[in-house]
Image: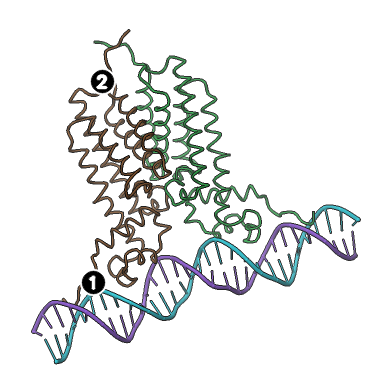
Chain colours: A green, B brown, C cyan, D purple
Amino acid sequence: MPDIKHFDPDAALERAEHLFWRLGAATVSIQAVTAETGLNRSSLYATFGGKRQLYLAALRRYVRERARPACERLAGDGRGLPAVQEAFDALIDQRCSGAYAGWGCMLVNAYAGGEAEDPDVRALLDDHHRRLRDAMADALAAARAAGQLARHVDIDATAEALVLLAYGVNLRSRAGAAAETLRRTVATTLAALETPPPRAD
Amino acid sequence: MPDIKHFDPDAALERAEHLFWRLGAATVSIQAVTAETGLNRSSLYATFGGKRQLYLAALRRYVRERARPACERLAGDGRGLPAVQEAFDALIDQRCSGAYAGWGCMLVNAYAGGEAEDPDVRALLDDHHRRLRDAMADALAAARAAGQLARHVDIDATAEALVLLAYGVNLRSRAGAAAETLRRTVATTLAALETPPPRAD
DNA sequence: AGCATCCTGAAACGGTCGTTTCAAGATAGC
DNA sequence: GCTATCTTGAAACGACCGTTTCAGGATGCT
């Protein structure tokens, strides 16, 4: 091998990911990426191809490093409703405070920007949507098995509804919504799924 | 008056609105607007100012002509849950079929693009969010008065949750989600709010 | 008809876009 | 240390960006 790269491709991709995540694909220029990562156009094009492929790689990295782990944590947690509650709490914390506050979810952002027109992006969005919905359904099934769920609750449709609720949380967090409001909204929704106490009448 | 405009400003603004709605502010160029509206740069700039102000005017038109009327229809409908159901059905129809299928909601789209960074845009988003939430709360209050609502339902928090659900619907519609899936998701959520039938046990 | 006023069309502004090119620099194998 | 091969830096590509300018055309008023 005559020469090796003088930089760490994944570290550079992470910087690009952050840029796309925060600002959207349309707003981020190649020049902005070179400035952020420190590498120059030649290395960037040689490593990732053009802008479209760079954005796709960044989106895939986001799924791999952030979205998917959250899914698997939820799906693998057998506690039922507490697991769902905890997943939402973690989400809201991530979105409203810390280094990524106000950035929303890179996947949710992709829906709204022109990014979703790209068939590869859309496939990614659909795939992750299915994954998250299934993970949520797993958690709800565990809740049912534990007797936490009210009789009337339809697991599949409720899982889909909770995922859409999570999308809404991600959106509102981008406009700086108060974490407390979001928490209360989610808590109320989840409380409505619980086995009701014996009726007084 | 020496001369008058040779075009209808609001008709032109509607074309621009459609462009921004479908493609997002970052993706739409002034050239694309002139091509779509037929008027040239001079008239455009003289009438609306720059791109930022044009986008803002288009967004305001969207609120005035589309979002606000939907809000008022919901708030003014005293039937309770059926009104909420009908609002969601109309939303899903709009998003999944007809001339605007796959465009999502221009306001929801604005959250994700860089558009929400603009303080004027953010103010608009927050204002409409409050308005929609209040309209939803009005409808839920009517439902409670009619005895349609289960005891445990917190009107304010549920109103917020339903609005976030609507945002989720708008998002998913942009990726071509099936109307039937969305309808089922919403119907299940609303059914969970209804006064439960007497228990069998 | 003449004038003042506004609108329209087209060209041009500097700047940035994504992408390509190519010579100079760096490295592994011999 | 030589060479083959890859990476790097910098310049340049044409195209398009949002915006401005200005001469010429159209209009309402006197």
Residue nearest the observer in this picture, A178 or B190: B190
Q: Amino acid at mark 2?
A: Thr
Chain letter of the residue beneath label 1 in the structure image: B
Residue that badge 2 annotates: B195
As drawn, is B127 to the left or to the right of C1?
right
Q: Position of residue B52 (x, y in %)?
A: 35, 61
Q: Which mark is residue B191?
A: none
Please tell me whether mark 1 sits on a helix, a strand or a loop: loop
Q: Report the side of D1 relative to B152 (left or right).
A: right
Q: Chain of mark 2?
A: B
Q: Alpha-carbon neighbours of circle 1 within 10 Å: few (<14), some, or many (≥20)?
A: few
The residue that appears at 36% across and 56% down in the rendered structure is B20
Give, as a three-letter code, the residue at label 1: His
Earlier sequence position, callout 1 versus callout 2? 1
State which quadrant residue B15 falls in.
Answer: bottom left
Query: Residue A196 lies in what quarter of the image?
Result: top left
Q: Position of residue B150 (x, y in %)?
A: 26, 21
Indicate whether D11 appears above or below B86.
below
Badge 1 is on which residue? B6
Residue at 28 percent across and 54 percent down: it is: B60
Binning the other alpha carbons within 10 Å of mark 2 as few (below 14), some (14 to 19) or many (20 upward) gives some
Q: Nearer the viewer, residue A16 or D14?
A: D14
Q: Residue furthest top?
A: B201
CA–CA distance in space, label 1 to label 2: 59 Å
Q: Are marks 1 and 2 in contact (CB under 8 Å)?
A: no
Q: Are both tags, 1 and 2, on one chain? A: yes
Q: Position of residue B51 (x, y in %)?
A: 36, 63
Q: Where on the picture, by quarter, is residue A182?
A: top left
**Residue at 24% of width from left, 42% of height from top?**
B71
User: Mark 1 or 2, which is nearer the eye?
Assistant: 1
